Image (tube, rainbow, N blue to C red):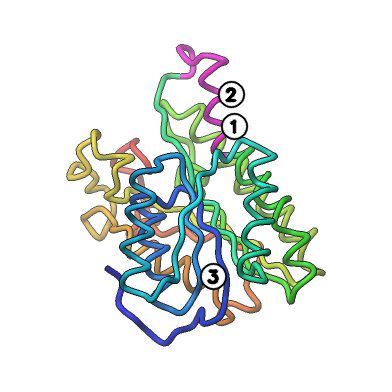
């Protein structure tokens, strides 16, 4: 579990999608450790409830869980309304939910393309559109979109996943331009191979193409997200930050990406 640091998120209220496990759960735990009130969301209700209870137990009730299908426009509206009504404000959105899918382009289906894009791109779009009015009404806020190194380079077999992450990278910049005047910062992060359930079946020990020679850990991603959510990053918006152990610094050894 996360260690308490300097409480850099003290008093902030955050929504984190895809928080039942992996990166999202690590982010939620760290946010609570740093003083934030966190609303974990997911479609994995049993795991989400368990994660929120564990975090709340350690950090004095600073975490709750809400079911959220990120492709459901009405569900987003209800989530934001519930968060503001319950906690009085909304400062941070982390669009962490996503799915991974790998198929050669010539074998890809329209249905799978649409499904991947609906979660990886439409979901963050709906999230940003839903939280913006509440953030504008307050003192601004921070939105962190979790893209991928697959959104920074081309990878064979990732027509659906990679294109959705490229699009999220672009949408982040558009949102940063449009929302900046309201004090809302929008950034994207681009993890490489991170040891989470999403790549568990892909033998993450094979991801040694990064100069650091290992997979990243969810807690390492959480630290970057925490920084972007905090006032320490008050002049950082529209950025794209690769956190990949140096993988994109040189020639790719493996075609596999996060």
Q: CA distance from mark 1 to mark 3?
A: 25 Å
Q: Residue at x 24, y 34 (%)?
A: 202
Q: Could you classify mark 3 by the number of other residues whose Cα lies within 10 Å: few (under 14), some (14-19), or many (20 or more)? A: many
Tell me what residue is drawn at x 68 percent, y 44 percent: 126
In the rendered structure, are the residues bearing label 2 and label 3 in contact, judged by CB atoms less than 8 Å apart?
no
For the C terminus, give its image quadrant: top left
- 224 shown above or below 75: below
Do the residues under discs 1 and 3 have CB atoms within 8 angstroms?
no
Q: Are marks 1 and 2 in contact (CB under 8 Å)?
A: yes
Q: Earlier in the sequence, mark 2 or mark 3?
A: 2
The number of numbered discs placed on residues in the rendered structure image is 3
Q: Circle 2 sits on which residue?
A: 114
Asked which secondary structure carries label 3, the reply is helix
Left or right of 116 on screen, residue 211: left
Q: Position of residue 146 (x, y in %)?
A: 51, 52
The CA distance from mark 1 to mark 2 is 6 Å
Residue position marked by numbered label 1 in the rendering: 118
- Whether residue 102 is in magenta: the answer is no
Q: Which residues are magenta?
A: 105-120
- Among numbered discs 1 and 3, the one appearing first in the sequence: 1
Magenta: main secondary structure: helix
Q: Cα distance, mark 2 to mark 3?
A: 30 Å
Residue at image position (57%, 75%) is: 12
Q: Examine the image and state in which quarter residue 220 appears.
A: bottom left
Q: Which mark is residue 228?
A: 3
């Amino acid at each position: 579990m996360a260690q308490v640091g300097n409480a850099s998120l003290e008093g902030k209220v955050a929504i984190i999608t895809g928080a039942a496990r992996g990166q999202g759960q690590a982010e939620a735990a760290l946010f609570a450790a740093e003083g934030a009130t966190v609303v974990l969301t997911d479609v994995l209700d049993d795991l989400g409830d368990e994660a929120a209870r564990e975090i709340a137990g350690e950090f004095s009730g600073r975490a709750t869980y809400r079911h959220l299908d990120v492709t459901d426009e009405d569900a987003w509206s209800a989530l934001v309304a519930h968060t503001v009504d319950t906690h009085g404000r909304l400062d941070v959105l982390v669009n962490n939910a996503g799915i991974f899918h790998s198929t050669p382009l010539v074998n890809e289906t329209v249905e799978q393309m649409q499904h991947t894009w609906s979660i990886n791109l439409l979901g963050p779009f709906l999230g940003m559109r839903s939280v913006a009015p509440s953030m504008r009404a307050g003192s601004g806020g921070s939105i962190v979109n979790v893209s991928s190194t697959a959104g920074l380079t081309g990878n064979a077999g990732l027509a659906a996943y990679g294109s959705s992450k490229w699009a999220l990278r672009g949408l982040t910049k558009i949102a940063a331009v449009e929302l900046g005047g309201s004090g809302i910062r929008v950034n994207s992060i681009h993890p490489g191979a991170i040891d989470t359930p999403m790549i568990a079946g892909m033998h993450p020990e094979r991801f040694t193409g990064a100069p650091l020679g290992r997979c990243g850990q969810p807690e390492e991603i959480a630290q970057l997200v925490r920084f972007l959510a905090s006032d320490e990053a008050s002049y950082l918006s529209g950025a794209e930050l690769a956190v990949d152990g140096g993988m994109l610094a040189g020639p790719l050894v493996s075609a596999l990406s996060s």
